[in-house]
Amino acid sequence: MSGLLALLDDVAAIAKAAAASVDDIAAGAARAAAASVDDVAAGAAKAGVKAAGVVIDDAAVTPAYLGGLPAARELPIVARIAAGSLRNKLVVLLPAALLLSLVAPSAIAPILMAGGLYLCFEGAEKLLHHLSPDGAGAGEAPALSAAHLEETRVRGAIKTDFVLSAEIMTIALASLPPDQGLGLRAVVLAVVAVALTALVYGGVAALVKVDDVGLHLARRARTAALRLVGRGLVRGMPALLALLSAVGTAAMLWVGGGILVHGADELGWATPARLVHDAARALAGVLPGSFAGVVEWAAGAALAAALGVVAGMVVAAALALAEGLRARPG
């Protein structure tokens, strides 16, 4: 009998030990899961901040594709472009970014710089378009049907988004720690892709309906104050779109120039980064306290944008020269 009791005591002790082990495993798993969630959130937030300039440009570019189309089709078109953007990021760019980080991590900086140069070129072209006397009058051929025009616009928007999304995903990849696991990288990049797509195209969807809201208020609001607000929204929408376009162009040049400066620094040419940093510090030195930090950041962004303009103009001139040489007879 005593032997049986001893055996039962041993079984109870083993059960307690097993229960304690299960508790330890569960607690460890919970801590690991919480740490992973924190890592994903921190990585996604850091990558999102790094890609903010491209996100601003993406949001500024998209409304231009809706001009001349029926108001009833605006939200469906934005939804189609958003779906194409998400497909660009998750199906094509995310696997390509992970593969790149595995087989050729040293190529990330040059690829990022190539994207930055493209942003500079696009920004310089927009700047030249705004400054040219006939720039505001350029438009699409009016002979296209509404359905054909919509398809053309959607394809063009998704194509432009692919370049911007590639830049966003490369910036996000470059911001992650090099020793981070592949699975965690994939999750962070997926979170960045979904969150920034929702942010950009959710904002665009709200933006393109501001004039409709204003028109509704102007016509049907019960109070004079709300009708006045509605008329202000309708009248202010063109100026808001123009401002957004200007901000997008500035962001494109700032981000593109900044990428070129930091990329050159990573590849061993530190002179541009040092010049921008020293000039920004010198400008910030004339102001005291917290204003100095703001001025230093703004000066650095402005100098990066100026370098972006120069780089973009050089690319535009080179392409124009190449096009002229190709068109020359004989």
Image: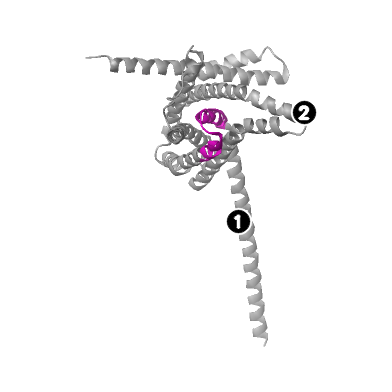
In what element is the residue under mark 1? helix
The amino acid type of the residue labelled 2 equals: Ala
Stretch in magenta: 50-79
Judging depth in this view, the residue of 299 and 130 nearest the camera is 130
Which residue type carries mark 1? Ala
**Which quadrant would the N terminus be assigned to in this image?**
bottom right
Q: Is residue 69 at all visible to an observer of this figure? A: yes
Mark 2 or mark 1, whichever is nearer to me: 2
- Near mark 2 (Cα within 10 A), the count class, few <14, some 14-19 or many ≥20, is few
User: Is 30 included in the stretch rendered in magenta?
Assistant: no
**Percent coordinates x, y for residue 324 in the rendering:** 32, 15
Question: Dot 1: few (<14), some (14–19), or many (≥20) neighbours within 10 Å?
Answer: few
Q: Is residue 318 left or right of residue 137?
A: left
Where residue 224 is drawn, which disc sits there? 2
Instruction: Answer whether labels 2 and 1 touch (C-beta < 8 Å).
Output: no
Where residue 54 appears, as percent x and y from the top left, is 53, 29
Nearer to me, 37 or 25: 37
